[in-house]
Image (spheres, rainbow, N blue to C red):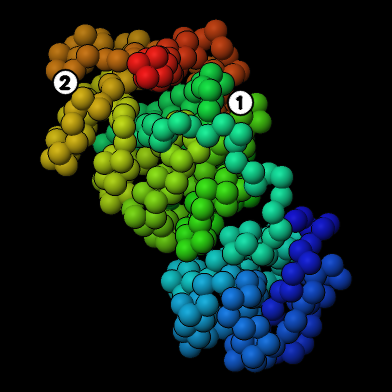
Amino acid sequence: MNPAEPSAHPVAVVDDDPKLRTRLGMQLGTGVEVVSFPSIEAMEEKFSSGSPLVVLFGPSFADPTGLKGVEALSYRRPDIGALLVVEMLSTEMLRMALRAGVRDVIELPAESSQLLEAIERVAVTIRVLPRTPEATLPAERPAELGAVITVFSAKGGVGKSVIASNLAVALARNASGPVVLVDADLKFGAVAVMLKLTPQYTVLDVVAAMQRLDAELLQRLLLRHEPSGLLVLPAPVEPAFADQVSASDMVKIVKLLQTFCQYIVIDTPGDDNDVVRALLEEADDILLIAGMDLPHIKNVKVGLRALQEANIPLSKVKLVVNRANSKVGFDVGEVERTLQMKADCPVPSDIVVPQSVNKGLPAVLGAPRSGVAKSMERLAELFLAGSRSSRDER
């Protein structure tokens, strides 16, 4: 569905103001069957349980009493996808609405296209939309569960997202099966920006569909990076949405991705939180990113200690030394001796990195002859070679 071809399914508009209901209905256009109601009770008399429905709640529900009614409806009717329009959007209102089960909040006045796009996003998650060719799974599904690669550092600013996105693209171009990049930096994820993608759906939409989520629906909610074929699950577009995604949600998503992807690359924030810990525990391999200065090396030691305390085998860890040729008083050998670990992949500092980030084109695509790109290809080969060895053994 797009604004030019709206859904044939009805959309319920609920508000106690008849003029506002009429105005919203007119904004949605003649291609949408709009049914308006003054109350939740009136709507439920018309639409019984089991009929997936997008409901657009008006500003009369934008208070604790109204949202309590929306929350009760969302609890007893998981087949309903709720949207809320408000006269003035605040962070507190956004949080209250999300806690009540609202999928998205839109501030008035809003463009018709904005309303239709929000309805589309919610419609997909409650399976209102008909099946499309894009919904089909890859012809060849992995013979075994996909490998989970979690990119980790105890502190931000070491280039995790750059490494995660370049590695994922390199894998996608060379792997025999689908590769997905998951942005688990739920507050400030930048993967979509680095790949020049505009998120139509994010992890928040996946979580909203959790009760009916299967591999087919999940694939429909993934973005595709056309230059490489990489699948992408972006982080929420607003930091306030991060609290709506739990560690158990992320684990369920990753486990489902494993059923149809060969590699799942996960970019994590430089925070110690439940989501990061859960994704480290799920990992088959952990890329521990180290910088070349003393504070970063200290933070790597903190990260290693955290892994040990979580009983995560250090045999899973691959050390990636970023900006390895930086003239900061340390060399790679000194970093290895300090950490008592061998660097699996030194990555040089290179001007192409900020250039590639600004262009939204990973270095492995935009500057394939650069030292950074070659390092990322070598890193990808560590995983690809392991996969080939496993197949040969079988």
Examine the image and state in which quarter residue 301 appears: top left
Label 1 secondary element: loop
| Residue at which label 2 appears | 339
Mark 2: give few (<14), some (14-19) or many (20+) Cα within 10 Å.
some
At which x and y percent is residue 186? 42, 49
Mark 1: give few (<14), some (14-19) or many (20+) Cα within 10 Å.
some
At which x and y percent is residue 223? 60, 42
Answer above or below: position of 216 versus 149: below
Examine the image and state in which quarter residue 3 appears: bottom right
Q: Does residue 122 appear to the left or right of 258 in the view shown?
A: right
Residue at 41% x, 44% y is 254
Which of the marked residues, 1 or 2, is nearer the chain's N terminus?
Answer: 1
At which x and y percent is residue 64? 46, 84
- Residue 228's tag is 1
Quarter containing the N terminus: bottom right
Examine the image and state in which quarter residue 4 appears: bottom right
Label 2 secondary element: helix
Residue type at the position of mark 1: Ser
263 vs 120, nearest the viewer: 263
282 vs 91, nearest the viewer: 282
Residue at 43% x, 71% y is 99
Total number of numbered labels?
2
Residue at 57% x, 52% y is 217
Q: Which mark lies nearer to you, 1 or 2?
A: 1
Answer above or below: position of 135 versus 9: above
Answer above or below: position of 42 versus 211: below
Q: CA distance from mark 1 to mark 2?
A: 35 Å
